[in-house]
């Protein structure tokens, strides 16, 4: 077993959790399932594994980043390394072998490991569009934290540097398309909050004491900042064209079109709808989001209508 603790955040994940644990439990020393009081068999399934420990914690208003950072601060982790996985994710066999070969021999200066994520959508590997997504998912304990964002958050190193492994882990959701779309409707609130935060500087800097995010993640955030300055609705269409045509999403057949349409056009359009709703509300109430009073009113609107609390310092 590798000297790694895996952290998995869950809420009603009985559809995925067994598959994930079957693959990861034989590989790592400990697994902490941080459960948000699931109403299905998630906890029961997790507790049936000898090296799985379940901690229950209410989902914070600071969303995924807050929950993961709570786990890093409160779980009794005893290993050198930590790996973050979602319940619907799992490492490929080749990645497991690569981890076993390389991690024990890494020098102390290496504090993070970047992995490639492949999406399995409707049972098919989406080779076009956005593959590979490179994410820092393994890191030395107490050498990293989750960046303070409401959406598209990444692991950030506090010190040291990262290396990139060759093989993939999978994002392989088994939920149906209706549930998939419902999840993205919920994501849209967090994404719109992040967009508004960047537009109107509702909070302070979220990057204090952060030295490394990962090359692709940093590039992605820079591109998103440019994207958010483009006109509403036009930008979601342009992103779909980029993913589906320029990045080869069309090569993945019908599934590739559905994947690119939902994630690249419909979801992004929904985010813009939420932003437009807020802008119209501000105008109707004669509020200027660039003024202190307007920013405070906007933060209160987001809290009251979307249940998201923006702190005075950092994104979450």
Image (cartoon, helix red, strand yellow):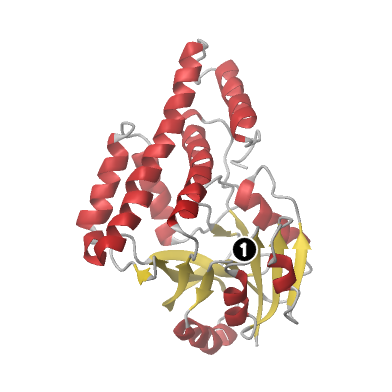
Q: Quadrant of the C terminus?
A: top right
Could you say where residue 116 lies in the image, as x and y percent from the top left?
42, 70
The residue depicted at 40 percent of the width and 34 percent of the height is 272
The residue depicted at 68 percent of the width and 76 percent of the height is 80
* Residue 4 placement: quadrant: bottom right
Q: Determine whether, in the image, residue 235 is placed left or right of residue 123.
A: left
Q: Residue 69 or 10: which is nearer the viewer?
A: 10
* Residue 275 placement: quadrant: top left
Q: Secondary structure at mark 1?
A: loop
Could you say where residue 120 lies in the image, as x and y percent from the top left?
40, 68
Q: Determine whether, in the image, residue 117 is placed left or right of residue 301.
A: left
Where 91 falls versus 144 (above or below)?
below
The residue depicted at 35 percent of the width and 71 percent of the height is 125
Could you say where residue 309 lies in the image, as x and y percent from the top left?
65, 35
Number of numbered tags placed on the structure image: 1
Which residue carries the number 1 mark? Answer: 13
Q: Quadrant of the N terminus?
A: bottom right
The residue depicted at 73 percent of the width and 80 percent of the height is 51
Where 283 falls versus 275 (above or below)?
above
Q: Residues within 10 Å of mark 1 (few under 14, many from 20)?
A: many
Q: Determine whether, in the image, residue 199 is placed left or right of residue 227.
A: right
Q: Residue 74 or 47: which is nearer the viewer?
A: 47
- Residue furthest toward the top? 286
Could you say where residue 180 lies in the image, as x and y percent from the top left?
47, 54
């Amino acid at each position: 077993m590798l000297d790694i603790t895996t952290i998995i955040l869950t809420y009603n994940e009985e559809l995925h959790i067994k598959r994930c644990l079957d693959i990861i439990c034989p590989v790592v020393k400990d697994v902490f399932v941080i459960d948000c009081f699931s109403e299905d068999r998630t906890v029961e399934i997790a507790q049936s594994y000898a090296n799985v420990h379940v901690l229950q914690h209410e989902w914070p208003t600071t969303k995924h980043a807050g929950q993961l950072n709570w786990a890093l601060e409160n779980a009794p982790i005893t290993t050198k390394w930590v790996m973050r996985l979602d319940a619907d994710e799992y490492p490929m066999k080749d990645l497991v072998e690569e981890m076993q070969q390389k991690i024990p021999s890494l020098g102390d200066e290496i504090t993070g490991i970047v992995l490639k994520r492949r999406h399995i959508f409707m049972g098919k590997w989406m080779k076009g569009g956005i593959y590979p997504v490179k994410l820092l998912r393994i890191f030395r304990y107490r050498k990293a934290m989750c960046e303070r964002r409401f959406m598209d958050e990444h692991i950030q190193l506090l010190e040291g540097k990262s290396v990139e492994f060759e093989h993939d882990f999978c994002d392989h959701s088994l939920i149906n398309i209706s549930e998939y779309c419902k999840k993205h409707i919920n994501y849209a609130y967090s994404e719109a909050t992040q967009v508004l935060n960047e537009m109107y500087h509702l909070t302070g800097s979220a990057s204090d004491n952060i030295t490394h995010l990962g090359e692709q993640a940093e590039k992605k955030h820079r591109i998103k900042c440019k994207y958010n300055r483009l006109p509403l609705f036009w930008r979601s269409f342009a992103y779909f064209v980029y993913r589906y045509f320029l990045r080869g999403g069309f090569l993945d057949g019908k599934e590739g079109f559905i994947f690119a349409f939902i994630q690249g056009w419909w979801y992004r359009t929904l985010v813009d709808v939420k932003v437009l709703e807020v802008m119209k509300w501000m105008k109707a109430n004669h509020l200027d989001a660039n003024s202190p009073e307007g920013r405070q009113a906007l933060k209160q609107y987001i809290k009251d209508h979307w249940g998201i609390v923006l702190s005075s310092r950092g994104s979450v």
